[in-house]
Image: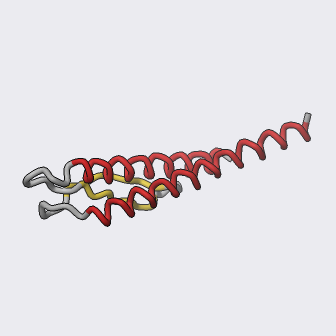
């Protein structure tokens, strides 16, 4: 269960980072010379995901991409949260059976 919770937790953190980056991009869309935040995600060796934020090479806004990224990050957050809730419920039932 421990690896399951750490994988889901890393997914929650990644989704939050993606949501923050997209919100920052939308907020600064009208700022002259602003370079968008781009989130890079990769699989972590022990499981889960590793994310980092880089700046785009060229300045400019892409509001459609940022709105889709916000929606996608919201769904990813909810899915990882559901995994944690299910793991918690399963562990609780296992303890009830064993007790």
Residue at the extreme front = 30
Side (left or right) of 44 relative to 86 = left
User: How many numbered discs, if any?
Assistant: 0
Above-or-below relation of 50 to 60: above
Residue at the extreme left = 32
Please name whichever residue, 98 or 82, is drawn nearer the observer in this view of the structure.
Answer: 82
Colouring rule applied to residues: secondary structure
- Name the spot of residue 58 as percent of width and height, x first: 12, 64
Residue at 15% x, 62% y: name it: 60
Residue at 13% x, 53% y: name it: 34
- Name the spot of residue 27 as percent of width and height, x first: 24, 48
Residue at the extreme top = 99
Residue at 8% x, 53% y: name it: 32
Residue at 84% x, 43% y: name it: 94
Q: Quadrant of the C terminus?
A: top right
Please name whichever residue, 68 or 93, is drawn nearer the observer in this view of the structure.
Answer: 68
Side (left or right) of 53 relative to 94 = left
């Amino acid at each position: 269960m421990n690896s399951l919770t750490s994988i889901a937790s890393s997914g929650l953190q990644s989704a939050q980072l993606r949501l923050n980056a997209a919100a920052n991009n939308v907020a600064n869309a009208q700022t002259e010379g602003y370079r968008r935040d781009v989130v890079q995600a990769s699989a972590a060796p022990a499981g889960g995901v590793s994310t980092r934020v880089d700046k785009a090479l060229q300045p400019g806004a892409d509001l459609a991409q940022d709105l889709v990224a916000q929606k996608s990050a919201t769904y990813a957050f909810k899915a990882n949260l559901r995994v944690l809730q299910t793991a918690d419920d399963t562990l609780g039932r296992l303890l009830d059976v064993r007790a």
